[in-house]
Amino acid sequence: MSALITTELVALDAGPSDVGGTDKTAVIRTLAGRVAAAGRATSADGLFDDAMDRESKVATGLPGGIAIPHCRSAAVTEASLAFARLTPAVDFGAPDGPADLVFLIAAPAEGDADHLTLLTALARALVRPEFVASLRAASTEAEVVTLVQDVVAPTETPATAGATAAAPAAAAPAAAAPAADRPTIVAVSACPTGIAHTYMAADKLAAAAREMGVDLHVETQGSSGATPIDPSVVSKAAAVIFAVDVGVRDRDRFAGKPVIQSGTKRAIQEPEVMIREALAAAQDPNARRVPGGSGSSDTPATSGGRPSTGSEIRRWLLTGVSYMIPFVAAGGLLIALGFLFGGYQIVNGNPDVEGQSYGLSWLLNNNVFDLPVAPGIEGLNDGLLGYLGALFVVLGQAAFGFLVPALAGYIAFAIADRPGIVPGFVVGAVSLTVGAGFLGGLVGGIIAGFAAKWIAGWKLPAGVRGLQPVVIIPLLATVISSGIMALVLGRPLALALTGLSDFLTGLSGSSAILLGVILGLMMCFDLGGPVNKAAYVFATTGIGVADPSPASLRIMAIVMGAGMVPPLAMAISTFIRKQLYTQAERENGKAGVLLGLSFISEGAIPFAAADPLRVIPSMMLGGATSGALIAAFGTELRAPHGGVFVFFAMTNFFLFLLAVLIGAVVGGVAVTLAKSVGRTPEAAPPAATEDAMVGASAGTTRSDAVRAS
């Protein structure tokens, strides 16, 4: 096996004249040229294009003045390292400034395992300060070659990526015998090429964990293979960290664990922060969890680490909704405050000012020294209260105006990363303009994301490559997605939305009760998952218009009421049959009272994850009961969130509260009976005398649902 680096691949103290410029494009082109000139690549341009394509996805600058542009390329015939020590340093996108040490890691498209293992050994060595210092101090090209060969020698490098991150050798003994009282975290790192970032992220996390006294096990899903973490280690882990730029293979192994997820670069730059976040998530019953599945891998081994189509679609939609929810919460609560201060007529048209509501006209034409006056109008407060109400309503309506653009923008973002944001937001705004509403946002966001991703994959000449992310992608992806929405899809989607709205507006009597049952079932089916989100988005977009219909207001009341049931039902069950639950679950039950009253359905997630077959059907029964009663009572709600604390934005509040309590009792009794049937006293969970850490783990590390936020 030939050496990865030779003296002809090293450039020391190279300036702009040596590399042909002062930017990273010139540096990468120069190093690619050296690899080709050494006979290790068939084409310098081919290697350069592949390296720049990888660079366009994620910048390769690292903290400490290091950059590692890298790629797999069909032009590469022999795995190679080209090195440049730059004077002055060149910006490669690192957060702390430009890089003066640059390694171009060039791997064949179908690299052999031995060479790829050596390349990853170099990436791991770059996290060691003493190695980096020696590169800066080297006086000759031969000295650099020797330094690199010493860290990538086969006798120094593990053959495969182990279940526990291969940290610097000096630290190995400490990791081999973790103390019994140290918290355990598992992690997975993976990047598209599986050469550099995968292993650097693993080693940074491992080093930070040792300093923090945390027992960390990292599985590197890289080019040189992966050895899965021992299932017993996964079982006892308090949380999991995914430092990945691609899908996680066999993700279901971690189902129910609190999860912190980011790209590999964040793990390299701030590993301590990610570990602290993981420790905090382990103590948070409402932390985001790794969703469970049918038992199959989220990303089959044959997919090369790429998620399945179903899981990807779910991720896109949930990403869009999750980013939209803050707009819903802020805008809805502001509007609710507007009703509290200004009265429910504050959003109605002002006959004295054409085309403006009372709220807008008062905000534009009055001030604290010239307060609005509207004597004798029922449901409308004037004076200071009216002026404050006008302010809150206008701010809330402005926030609501971003609902569909944010939904579409962040669906596109989930598909194409940052290049998808602009076309996604624009197509969302266009869908509002043509009347397609949230249906247009859903469809348009997907179109915008794929358009942006397609254009980002174009291999453009180097001279215009810099314009690709800032001009070419936003322009062309916007034209494609918004053009399709305006010219093709807008009218059919608008007709579908209008028909759905007209149908719901016409529901009354038993039909309205059936709607309440359906929405109640949806809200309790997956507690923050796609079905729950679909019902919630449908309700919130219905009240996000200037003058929502009574049917839309009733739907919002049904959705909120049903969503309040699961935490309250579980709280009731833990109160009436304590012996059915662990100590940690009883504590979660106490918290469930406030969570339920606040419309935070996720308070029931730990219970549903631990016992889904008994808990979820019981919650659906309770939610359907509340939904049907709220529909029968004709309660209307103008706020999208807040639970009982937005009583002032609700009609028939006490009947609404009664419906929620009845549904909670039904759900609580149902789950208690379901858990009691066929269970002997010996089968009951351990009592409060069990070790606190065991109880905490049982209550806080199992879930198969995703948080709503």
Image (cartoon, helix red, strand yellow):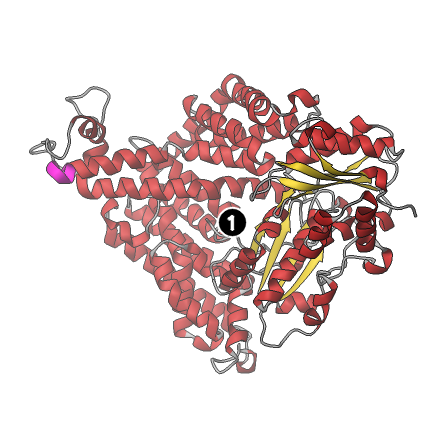
Answer few, some or many: residues within 10 Å of disc 1's Cα (few below 14, many 20 plus, some between 14 and 19): many
Is residue 274 positioned above or below 309 on the image?
below
Is residue 118 positioned above or below 507 on the image?
below
| Pointer 1 residue | 529
- Location of residue 146 in the rendering, given as x and y in whole percent from the top left corner: 83, 50
- Location of residue 176 in the rendering, given as x and y in whole percent from the top left corner: 71, 71
Quick check: 253 left or right of 622? right
Would residue 638 be seen by someone viewing this image from the given angle?
A: no
Q: Quadrant of residue 567?
A: bottom left
- Location of residue 555 in the rendering, given as x and y in whole percent from the top left corner: 36, 42
Nearest the eye: 235 or 74: 74
Nearest the eye: 251 or 681: 251
- Most extreme residue toward the right is 1
Q: Which residue is located at x 91 percent, y 45 percent?
A: 2
Q: Is residue 614 magenta?
A: no
Q: Which residue is located at x 48 percent, y 53 percent?
A: 527
Quick check: 230 left or right of 641? right
Would residue 503 be seen by someone viewing this image from the given angle?
A: yes
Q: Quadrant of residue 53?
A: top right
Nearest the eye: 694 or 19: 19
- Most extreme residue toward the left is 375
Q: Secondary structure at mark 1?
A: loop
- Location of residue 63 in the rendering, given as x and y in whole percent from the top left corner: 61, 47
Q: What stretch of residues is rendered in magenta?
A: 379-386
